[in-house]
């Protein structure tokens, strides 16, 4: 099942797509903004008439850096021997069709299309063999980074990875039962309709069961916590006005726009 969280008419609603919205893939995929949604109260609304929110109640955001060998190579860095993990605050989160600010004066800001894994059952010291029992579902993440602000490749600092509105989640939360093999999902990113990034989750250095076992060994994972599993190679600089669309097989198409400081009164 695919479902979203949206704001409409002064309230927050759970919504589901009508007519299989966003199931098509590729550059010619039907735009979900042209689809209609059914709210939990039965009303049907146009997708462009709602404000899209992250599609689930988000707990702790746990992000992986350099979790694809090709991306590590792209950044002229060796693949990690142990997961490079960092946390993100709630102010970073943004929904589908939102706007992400590009600060004035930066030289290199890029998207990161990632599979987001949502925890559904408390996980503490979970063995790899049982790790997937703790997954509720999946969504797409686009976790922007500004390379100007990196202290070094090991340490994604606050200005890079905890920026307000820099982590886009959505548009749909998809139940784990509806994703046959999360280790075989194609990822794609388009900038202004042009394909810029391609990858597949089969190329993760540290796969989902490993990450749940690793993380739950020293911290409790709770329902609503989300693991951002990293991005493949193909990141390019994005500028004001660029429209960025991230796709993952079976999870939909997550779109947002890069804007200037002035939009946020800065």
Image (cartoon, rainbow, N blue to C red):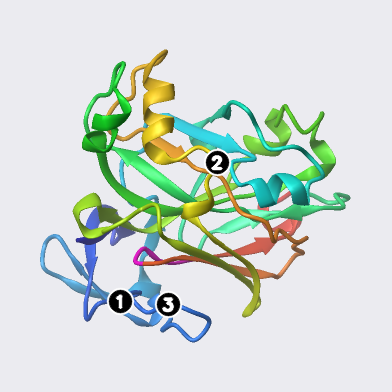
Is residue 251 something that shows in the picture? yes
Mark 2 or mark 3: name the one nearer the start of the chain: 3
* Relative horizontal placement of residue 59, taking residue 75 as reference (left or right): left
Q: Residue at x 62, y 35 (%)?
A: 162
Residue behind mark 3: 25
Q: Which type of secondary structure does the marked residue at label 2 adopt?
A: loop
Q: Is residue 70 left or right of residue 206?
A: right
Per the rendered image, the range of residues in magenta is 250-254
- Tell which residue pokes out farthest to the bottom in this image: 28
| Number of the front mark, 1 or 3 | 3
Which residue position is annotated with label 1? Answer: 21
Gap in Å between the C-alphas at discs 2 and 3? Answer: 25 Å
Q: Say whether marks 2 and 3 touch (CB < 8 Å).
A: no
Taking the spot 32% from the left edge, 29% from the top edge, the residue there is 128
Which of these two is toward me, 5 or 129?
129
Say which element carries label 3.
loop
Q: Residue 111, how many percent across, how many down?
A: 65, 56
Few, some or many residues within 10 Å of mark 1 (<14, 14–19, 20+): many
Residue 71 at x, y = what percent?
Answer: 68, 50
Report if residue 193 lies within the magenta region.
Answer: no
Frontmost of labels 2 and 3 is: 2
| Label 1 – label 3 distance at C-alpha | 11 Å
Q: Quadrant of residue 174?
A: bottom left
Sequence-wise first label, 1 or 2: 1
Separation (CA) of disc 1 from disc 2: 32 Å
Describe residue 60's horizontal placement relative to residue 255 as left or right: left
Measured as percent of width and height from the top left, residue 237 is found at 78, 60
The quadrant of the rendering that contains the N terminus is bottom left
**Residue 141 appearing in the image:** no
Provide the residue designation for mark 2: 205
Query: Which secondary structure dominates the residues rendered in magenta?
Result: strand
């Amino acid at each position: 099942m695919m479902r979203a969280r949206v704001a409409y008419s002064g309230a927050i609603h759970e919504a589901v797509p009508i007519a299989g919205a966003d199931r098509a893939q590729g550059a010619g995929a039907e735009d979900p903004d042209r689809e209609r949604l059914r709210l939990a109260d039965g009303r049907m609304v146009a997708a462009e008439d709602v404000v899209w929110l992250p599609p689930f109640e988000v707990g702790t955001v746990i992000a992986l850096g350099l979790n694809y060998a090709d991306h590590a190579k792209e950044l002229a860095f060796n693949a990690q021997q142990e997961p490079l993990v960092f946390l993100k605050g709630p102010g970073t989160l943004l929904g589908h069709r939102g706007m992400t600010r590009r600060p004035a004066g930066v030289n290199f800001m890029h998207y990161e299309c990632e599979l987001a894994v949502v925890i559904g059952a408390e996980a503490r010291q979970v063995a790899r063999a049982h790790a997937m029992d703790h997954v509720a579902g999946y969504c797409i993440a686009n976790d922007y980074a500004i390379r100007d602000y990196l202290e070094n490749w090991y340490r994604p600092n606050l200005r890079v990875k905890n920026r307000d509105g820099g982590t886009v989640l959505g548009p749909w939360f998809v139940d784990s039962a509806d994703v046959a093999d999360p280790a075989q999902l194609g990822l794609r990113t388009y900038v202004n309709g042009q394909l810029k990034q391609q990858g597949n989750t089969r190329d993760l250095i540290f796969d989902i069961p490993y990450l749940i076992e690793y993380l739950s060994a020293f911290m409790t994972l709770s329902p609503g916590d989300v693991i951002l599993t990293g991005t493949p190679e193909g990141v390019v600089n994005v500028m004001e006005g660029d429209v960025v669309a991230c796709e993952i097989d079976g999870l939909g198409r997550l779109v947002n726009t890069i804007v200037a400081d002035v939009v946020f009164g800065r």
